[in-house]
Image (cartoon, rainbow, N blue to C red):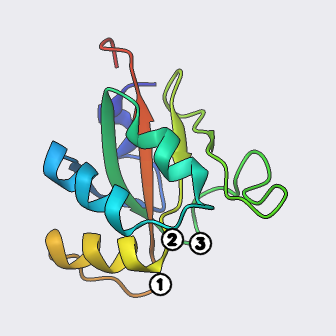
Amino acid sequence: MTLANLTQIQGLANFHFLEDKDRSKIKELEEEKNTGVFDVLKKSHVLLLTHDSRFRSPPSPIVVDGEFPAVKFPELEGAISASPGIKVHKYLVEKFNLVLTDEATLLVGWNSVSI
């Protein structure tokens, strides 16, 4: 699947690539135990998107030993994803002027340039 195909998946919306200043702000705001977000931020490309209840469930546990690890994002080869904490969620909603009802923010990161 390609990045363009993501826009066709039911339950996904609000696609925005993060710039370095956004990554820095997220690192500053995110809770230490949310290791998944920090792992996603280490990738070459980081995409913010939102998802609602129509999108699939996570492919693996999102809480392990009290931490929040990254999980595979099978829609993009080699990609991982993580849900930001409430401070980062609020920052992203404000920064990108997102109008949400029951959607959650999700960060997706990958290194490949072929997506």
Residue 36 pos. (x, y %):
57, 49
Direction from residue 1 to residue 53 in the image, left or right: right
Residue on which disc 1 sits: 102
Q: Residue furthest top?
A: 114
Q: Which mark is residue 77?
A: none
Q: Which mark is residue 52?
A: 2
Q: Amino acid at mark 2?
A: Asp
Residue on which disc 3 sits: 53
How many marks the image carries: the answer is: 3
Mark 1–mark 3 CB contact (< 8 Å): yes
Q: Amino acid at mark 1?
A: Asp
Residue 114 pos. (x, y %):
33, 11
Quarter residue 88 falls in:
bottom left
Q: Residue at x 52, y 67 (%)?
A: 31
Locate the C terminus and report the quarter of the image it occupies: top left
Tell me the CA gap for discs 3 and 2. 4 Å
Q: Is residue 38 above or below residue 64?
A: above
Q: Residue at x 38, y 74 (%)?
A: 89
**Dot placed on the residue nearer the N-terminal end, 1 or 3:** 3
Quarter residue 29 falls in:
bottom left
Q: Residues within 10 Å of mark 1 (few under 14, many from 20)?
A: few
Between 96 and 12, the residue placed more toward the observer is: 96
Mark 1–mark 2 CB contact (< 8 Å): yes
Q: Amino acid at mark 3?
A: Ser
**Dot placed on the residue nearer the N-terminal end, 1 or 2:** 2
What element does badge 2 sit on? Answer: loop
Direction from residue 105 to residue 17 in the image, left or right: left
